[in-house]
Image (cartoon, helix red, strand yellow):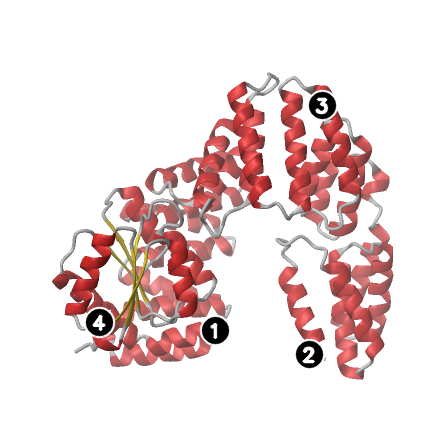
């Protein structure tokens, strides 16, 4: 018998009558601790103050965050305890809404209306399940994946009926431990025994990630034959075709996924990006428009969607002039971007460049050139810098708007910051044939290559001298700064020399200028932690 009087509940619904009715049901079950919220922001605030055993959250709360967005933020901010049960409730039963709710993986889903008996039956099962899986879930929350595997084995032995839930936890733990072969064997046995949708997706994803594209395609397609309403299968097909360079096929698969579940911000964003690459500007504009709309109350709101929407709307006009309605939409989109991310000077520059392009395409060439000149000056004074993709876009826009010198300056900074990335250099080469610019960092790259080899041979002092030379030659190169810092930490830790720690601090300050979304930021964070521990 479950003791509901010890459980703390949170009800989130914008209708007073429903909150009262649900509170009444819970009181009949013996629940003593019940909090209520009328919107997602209130729910998040309460979750920051209290730990809940059960959250009953309506999906659609009108204006503001919906249930899916609240759940995403709770996971991201680690506000849910391992034992907490999150149930999405909704009066809507459309396929798009139901699948959107299920894609964020709540513990359960309830359709209004429901009665006390059905509510208690659902809660009894979920609370029992969480109690049995408690050691597994707590180990997962700690990031102790060997303990997850051990706890799963014990639960399966003691409670065989919960083996399917434990198998999924085992797959995730093996993935986190990098034990791909064990992960594949377990998934293969599960799929052979019973074709569970999540296992089919995971096995196909693993094949794609390891480069076995034909096998991945076959698995995704087999999954669709059995489970045609699982959007993740279409996402996987699209990702596989993208990896194979088949952009049109990737776009078609994304479109199929969107027909099933159009309310996914990430899926709409991927569709916009692929459609852009396919020069399908009409589809790109539709997708980015949806992404902007879906992102307004989402943790995953992304300014790139606003910029890409403006770019796609402009590109739709081709060589013709932009119409008044299109210009109005672009201005509204850029205005929203400027207001929402007002503290980001690099984004402000990109927005102003897009505005200049809009002016140019709508018959105001002189005004566009004046604005572009102002932006070129601002770019030169920018303390931080763009990520590599944004830098190339900025350079191209500046050149189109008659600012060739400013465009070359942006490309030169990109070579210095990202010159050790061959893919970035290949893209830069598509924007310029300036041999001096493209080879500016070649000597520094060679020093860095030699230094890495010495570091791997544990010749740290010799490696440090070459890393220093590379960084002195290209002081804005992020990888050179991080490599130098890592070597200094190695030597400072062994010799406890304060001058080495001070030099490491300077290197990390140089690397800190990297864009917030740079893939090396996690490495920077770990090096910063190591320095602070010395």
The answer to whether residue 410 is seen in the rendering is: no
Check whether the beta carbons of the residues at disc 2 and disc 1 lie within 8 A of each other.
Answer: no
Task: Answer with mark 3 or mark 2, whichever residue precedes in sequence.
Answer: 3
Q: Residue at x 43, y 72 (%)?
A: 141
Q: Quadrant of residue 114?
A: bottom left
Q: Secondary structure at mark 2?
A: helix
What's the CA distance linking mark 4 and mark 1? 32 Å
Q: Name the spot of residue 247 as percent of width and height, x first.
A: 51, 36
Q: Quadrant of residue 165?
A: bottom left
What's the CA distance linking mark 2 and mark 1? 22 Å
Q: Quadrant of residue 321?
A: top right
Q: Secondary structure at mark 1?
A: loop
Q: Pointer 1: residues within 10 angstroms few (<14), some, or many (20+)?
A: few
Q: Residue 135 versus residue 290: which sits nearer the camera?
A: 290
Q: Is residue 22 above or below residue 419?
A: below
Which residue matches tag 4? Answer: 31
* In this rendering, the label closer to the viewer, 3 or 1: 3
Which residue matches tag 3? Answer: 367
Q: Is residue 163 left or right of residue 402?
A: left
Q: Is residue 447 above or below residue 242?
A: below
Q: Pointer 4: residues within 10 angstroms few (<14), some, or many (20+)?
A: some
Q: Give the numbered dot on residue 533.
A: 2
Which residue matches tag 1? Answer: 143
Q: Name the spot of residue 142 as percent of width and height, x first.
A: 46, 75
């Amino acid at each position: 018998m479950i003791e509901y009087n010890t459980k703390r509940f949170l009800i989130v619904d914008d209708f007073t009558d429903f909150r009262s009715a649900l509170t009444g049901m819970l009181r009949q079950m013996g629940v003593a601790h019940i909090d209520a919220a009328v919107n997602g922001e209130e729910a998040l605030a309460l979750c920051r103050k209290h730990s809940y055993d059960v959250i009953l959250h309506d999906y659609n709360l009108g204006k503001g965050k919906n249930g899916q967005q609240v759940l995403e933020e709770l996971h991201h901010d680690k506000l849910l305890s391992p034992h907490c049960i999150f149930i999405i409730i909704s009066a809507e039963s459309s396929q798009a809404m139901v699948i959107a709710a299920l894609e964020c993986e709540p513990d359960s889903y309830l359709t209004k209306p429901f009665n006390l008996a059905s509510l208690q039956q659902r809660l009894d099962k979920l609370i029992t399940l969480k109690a049995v899986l408690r050691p597994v879930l707590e180990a997962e929350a700690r990031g102790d994946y060997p303990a997850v595997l051990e706890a799963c084995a014990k639960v399966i032995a003691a409670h065989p009926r919960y083996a399917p839930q434990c198998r999924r936890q085992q797959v995730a733990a093996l993935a986190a431990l990098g034990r791909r072969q064990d992960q594949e064997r377990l998934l293969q046995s599960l799929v052979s025994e019973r074709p569970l949708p999540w296992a089919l997706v995971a096995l196909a994803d693993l094949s794609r990630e390891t480069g076995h594209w034909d096998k991945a395609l076959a698995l995704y397609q087999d999954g669709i034959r059995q489970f045609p309403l699982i959007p993740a299968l279409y996402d996987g097909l699209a990702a596989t075709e993208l990896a194979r360079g088949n952009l049109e096929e990737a776009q078609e698969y994304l479109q199929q996924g969107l027909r099933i579940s159009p309310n996914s911000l990430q899926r709409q964003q991927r569709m916009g990006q692929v459609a852009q690459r396919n020069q399908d500007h009409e589809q790109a504009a539709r997708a980015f428009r949806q992404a902007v709309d879906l992102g307004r109350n989402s943790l995953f709101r992304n300014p790139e969607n606003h910029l890409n929407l403006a770019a796609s709307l402009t590109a739709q006009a081709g060589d013709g002039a932009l119409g008044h309605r299109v210009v109005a939409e672009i201005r509204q989109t850029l205005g929203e971007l400027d207001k929402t991310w007002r503290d980001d000077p690099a984004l402000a520059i990109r927005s102003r460049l897009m505005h200049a392009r809009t002016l140019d395409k709508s018959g105001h060439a002189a005004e566009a050139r004046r604005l572009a000149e102002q932006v070129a000056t601002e770019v030169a004074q920018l303390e931080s810098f763009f990520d590599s993709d944004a830098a190339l876009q900025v350079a191209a826009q500046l050149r189109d708007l008659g600012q060739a010198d400013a465009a070359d300056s942006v490309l030169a900074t990109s070579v210095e910051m990202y010159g050790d990335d061959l893919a970035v250099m290949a893209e830069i080469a598509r924007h310029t044939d300036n041999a001096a610019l493209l080879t500016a960092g070649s000597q520094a790259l060679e020093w860095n290559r030699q230094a890495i080899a010495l570091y791997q041979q544990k010749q740290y002092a010799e490696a440090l001298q070459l890393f220093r030379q590379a960084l002195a030659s290209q002081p804005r190169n992020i990888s050179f700064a991080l490599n130098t810092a890592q070597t200094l930490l190695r030597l400072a830790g062994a010799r406890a020399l304060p001058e080495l720690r001070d030099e490491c601090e300077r290197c990390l300050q140089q690397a800190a200028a990297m864009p917030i979304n740079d893939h090396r930021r996690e490495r920077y964070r770990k090096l910063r932690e190591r320095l602070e521990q010395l």
